[in-house]
Amino acid sequence: MANILIINADPNLKRHIKLALPGMEHFVQYSANLQNASAQPLASKLDLVIARLVADDDQGPEDLVDLRATFPTARIVVTAALHDSALEGEKFQRVVRELQIEYCLLEPIETGAMLQTIQSALALPRRH
């Protein structure tokens, strides 16, 4: 059983995650944003964090830095709705690599891709 935190999920992402998790017994929590999530005392006990990045909400690579700093031991999956060409390029990919974000899925996301990504992320060794 894994402890999973979903941050900034829109209804479509919530639906994909619910479809991807049936039969798996995980403790899933939701947070409206990173600030609310970081106030929770469970950061060190999380196995997986799935965070939705939306470029048109003034989020950018700096938010990935905050995400990794807040959850240093969790495996991280970022789903990205990138509507800003500055974020779609090499800078964004470089930040993802440098912060050792395990997976980055660009929207739109298929349910099968979400399922495979969650299973793959949970199979990775826990970060230290």
Image (cartoon, helix red, strand yellow):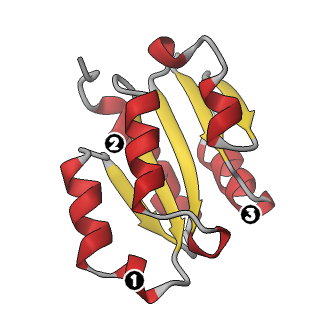
In the rendered image, which quarter is residue 66 located in?
top left
- Which is nearer the N-term, disc 1 or disc 3? 3
Image spot of residue 116 (x, y percent): 42, 51
In the picture, the disc for residue 12 is 3
- Would you name the residue on which mark 2 appears? 120
Residue at 21% across, 64% down = 94
Give the mark count: 3
Q: Secondary structure at mark 3?
A: helix
Report the mark closest to the observer, 2 or 3. 3
- Would you name the residue on which mark 1 appears? 86
Report the mark closest to the observer, 1 or 2. 1
- Which is nearer the N-term, disc 2 or disc 3? 3
Badge 3: residue crowd in 10 Å (few <14, some 14–19, many ≥20): few
Amino acid type at image mark 3: Asn
Above or below — where is 13 with respect to 87?
A: above
Q: Secondary structure at mark 2?
A: helix
Q: CA distance from mark 2 to mark 3?
A: 21 Å
Q: Secondary structure at mark 1?
A: helix
Q: CA distance from mark 1 to mark 2?
A: 29 Å
Residue at 75% across, 59% down = 10
Amino acid type at image mark 2: Ser
Above or below — where is 29 with respect to 52?
A: above
Image spot of residue 121 (x, y percent): 36, 39
**CB within 8 Å, label 1 to label 3:** no
Quarter of the figure that contains the C terminus: top left
Badge 2: residue crowd in 10 Å (few <14, some 14–19, many ≥20): few
Badge 1: residue crowd in 10 Å (few <14, some 14–19, many ≥20): few
Residue at 42% across, 50% down = 64
Image spot of residue 36 (x, y percent): 71, 32
Taking 38 as reference, is 128 left or right? left
Image spot of residue 53 (x, y percent): 55, 60
